[in-house]
Image (spheres, rainbow, N blue to C red):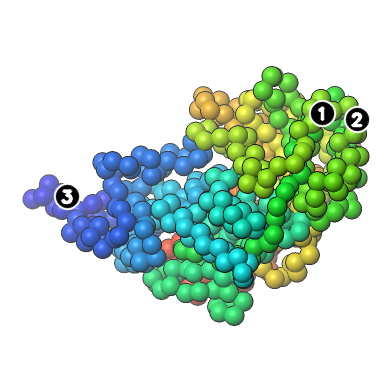
Amino acid sequence: MAGGNQMSTVEVRGQFLDIVGVDRAKVDALRSALRGILLQPSDDGYEKARTIWNEMIDHRPNLIVQCAGVSDVIVAVNFARINELLVSVRGGGHNVSGNAVCNGGLMIDLSMMTSVHVDAERQTARAEGGATWKDYDRETQVFGLASTGGAVSRTGIAGLTLGGGWGWLGGRHGLACDNLLSADVVTADGQLVTASADQNENLFWGLRGGGGNFGVVTSFEYKVHPVHEVFGGVVWHPMESARDVLLFYDEFTESCSDDLVSLVQFVTLPDGPLALGVEVCYFGGVQKGEEYLRPLREFGSPIGDDVGPTTYVDYQQASDEVFPEKIQNYWKSNFLKRLDARSIDVLIDYAKKIPTPESVAMIEQVGNGVRRVDTNATAFNHREARYSFLICGMTPDPENNSQIVSWTQEFFDAMTPFTDESVYVNYLGSQDEEGDDRVLAAYGAGKYERLVKLKNKYDPSNLFRLNQNVKPTLNPDR
């Protein structure tokens, strides 16, 4: 009798991390209700569906709903809510924290929903929630248009936009979320709502930086801008020159053109040595770019310079090889207060201790367009910052994990005197490790309180908790 009962249910992890026995007939009904695919661990395609870019994440959902459209998302959300299941939502699956994949619960997978429609006359583009920036850029650039998007083309538009969204167009056009015109959202009660400046405007405020706390965004509508030739690339310097180069870089970017966004990176070159790279992306035309960037390119004694004309699509994919697939990732990040002689000395000291050839440390310039937006206009915070500091411990070999973790943590701690407590939400690791205080630091107390009010309204039971979670107060035990 017990064995028969066991066979008649499917074990799925619940919201409170308990094991819920879901009647197999209900699971079969779920499968029949979908236009897309329901995967369980024994099904073909399951392993591929559960695998994401960060190989350090090895989670196994017991149910994966690969949605073909909005109706599938609604069906999946309702099923999870009614059965009180643990839920994760996968867009591009490129976030380092691994929140896209739950352990034992139900994963709502949007990776089949990748269509992009461009309205060239209105200069807008609408993309489904599973699209990547590679999908988006390919379609918008057919019309010579683009909007701020991720520097790694495999990144999903959903996660990047909902957390804010750095990008090479940030000097002119701000963050990805600053270009968002509207979003269609399936909320925890299974309702499809539209959020924009005119509809559900408080939700629209929260979606622009508040992450996936309020529902599953099935489509994003963006403002797009004319973007044609790019003048960009990397100027490489030996580590012996790094201190002088960084001091000059800080001075050069202090009064920066809107046409430029840049970063500096400590990277191990293919032929072996560690080097400092100054990466620049200029949108003001090749001739002006040549002139404007000449002081930066001619400073010191560079060992390499590949800066030149290229297409926007090619440049958007140029960093893909720095963050390859099938690799272990452990990241830490904060915003820099300053880039001065003391902080530079610490940067160089720890960069020289880099544990693996794949690991990298970056100082990312926050584009002028980010700072032009009123700080209270969106949930995204830190618009006054000049630089974001990011340490990426990476290795293809899991046996090196302890090395990349210890180096990243020690580097992060050593830089604490020069960084703010604040952090870019898209660079946070798992909340279990980072702690609730880090989520609060990503928004600041005032914005966090406003996000809690939105959470209480749209997801009071915290169904959508696998994210950088803003916890509701109406049901504090959840």
Amino acid marked by disc 3: Gln
Mark 2 packing: few (<14 Cα in 10 Å), some, or many (20+)?
A: some
Amino acid marked by disc 1: His
Q: In the image, is 54 to the left or to the right of 78?
A: right
What label does residue 6 carry, if any? 3
Mark 3 to mark 1 CA distance (whole Å): 64 Å
Mark 2 to mark 1 CA distance (whole Å): 8 Å
Q: Which residue is mark 1?
A: 237
Residue 236 % position (x, y)? 79, 30
Q: Which residue is mark 2?
A: 300
Q: In the image, is 112 to the left or to the right of 290?
A: left
Between discs 2 and 1, the one toward the N terminus: 1
Marks 2 and 3 in Cβ contact (< 8 Å): no
Looking at the image, the residue that sits furthest to the left is 1
In this view of the protein, which residue sits in the foreground, 31 or 132?
A: 132
> Does residue 350 appear in this view?
no
Residue 345 % position (x, y)? 84, 33
In this view of the protein, which residue sits in the foreground, 124 or 412?
A: 124
The residue that appears at 75% across and 69% down in the rendered structure is 374
Amino acid marked by disc 2: Gly
The residue that appears at 89% across and 40% down in the rendered structure is 294
